[in-house]
Image (spheres, rainbow, N blue to C red):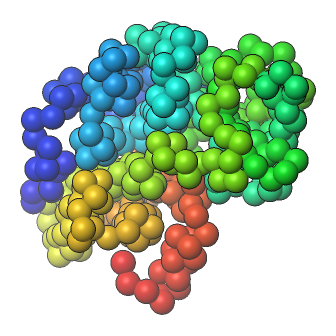
Amino acid sequence: MLIPDWNHWNPDKPGIALLESRLSELAGLDAKADEHGTWNEPLWQAIVAAGAHRWIPGKEQGGLGLDTASVLSLYGKLAEASLTAAFLLSQQDAAVRRLLPSSDRAHVASLLQDVVAGKTFVTVGISQLTTSTRLGEAAMRVRQETDGGLILDGAMPWVTGATRAEAFVTGGVLEDGQQVLVVVPRSRPGITVGDPLPLAALQASCTCEVQCVQVRIEPKEVLAGPSLEVMKIPGLAGTGGLETSALALGQARAALAALANLTTRNGQEHEPTTALATLWETLAADLLLAARQAPNAPPPAEIRQRANALVNRTAQAFLTARKGSGFLRTDPAQRWARQAMFFLVWSCPTPVAQASIRDLAGLCPL
């Protein structure tokens, strides 16, 4: 059976042909990355070779400066091949988006040029300002210096690619409750990158806790703030979580295509696969409507909840169809099932999490 694809919406956008030439390589590397659970440099270099690191930076920085809908469709295709790769890229892109408003500063411009050249990996450590309360509401405390500089004390709870990153975009809370956003090189005295956290999936993302002890931030390294909610400043807030939904849809399509192939080969019932494919196509269309800010687009939180449910149902359906073979560590079915659970907890706002729990309890439809 024919499974819908992202190209239906963005058939001729820059970046697609180069990415598609690397999809098989990325898919093979994802399995190896999951098996070893450590930083996979060939995987990151395949991302760079596919030109994915140039999607977000503007043409002034040597990037492509793609529109949101194009980026989301490319994220989906990348996640279909390798969710690990897409996760790593999304975190660098999150940092780049927050650096771009300050690109007129020489040191930020230089950092962005190195990112576009594929020389530098940057990442974000901002969950303490958004969804994470694991270390308390003021996991990162900030003290102002008389010269305009800052002192950071505390931790970034979840930092993806921390073992490989050359710089972090992070933030913290001042004594008066206001927040700041900063960029700081990893080499700055007082920064310690912990061991990768023992995640159930995506451990090759090398997600770590990063400790900051009396870390000096120069005035030129302050990107935004002080502000009561610095992440809501226009230009810094991202795209409402649509990137995460795109990644979920990408992985759902990988499991869906595998399920369709298995169903056809074994002469099994097509109706469940067709139903999942219809849900995928409808949700992908809604995601791109939201990316284009169409007036009839569903809100991002609704899209995220539906994406969470769809990726988990599709992965579980393929695992079930694969039977015992799918439970082997060498089979993609078990890897996709583990990775799908990540969407239930990754940057998942409380209303979305509660909606997912209600769906699991059978209290609301997909």
Image quadrant in which you'd find residue 289: bottom left
Between 61 and 284, the one nearer to me in the picture:
61
Residue 146 in the image, given as x and y percentages of width and height? 88, 25
Q: Residue at x 85, y 33 (%)?
A: 144
Vertical side of 101 occupied by 226: above or below: below
Question: Is residue 35 at all visible to an observer of this figure?
Answer: no
Vertical side of 337 occupied by 58: above or below: above
Q: Residue at x 56, y 60 (%)?
A: 348
The quadrant of the picture occupied by the N terminus is bottom left
Residue 308 in the image, given as x and y percentages of width and height? 44, 64
Between 2 and 365, the one nearer to me in the picture:
365
Residue 244 in the image, given as x and y percentages of width and height? 44, 51
In the image, taking residue 270 as reference, residue 123 lies left or right, namely right
Q: Residue at x 52, y 26 (%)?
A: 102
Between 318 and 48, the one nearer to me in the picture:
48
Question: Is residue 6 at all visible to an observer of this figure?
Answer: yes
Q: Residue at x 46, y 28 (%)?
A: 100
Between 88 and 265, the one nearer to me in the picture:
88
The quadrant of the picture occupied by the C terminus is bottom left
Residue 83 in the image, given as x and y percentages of width and height? 42, 41
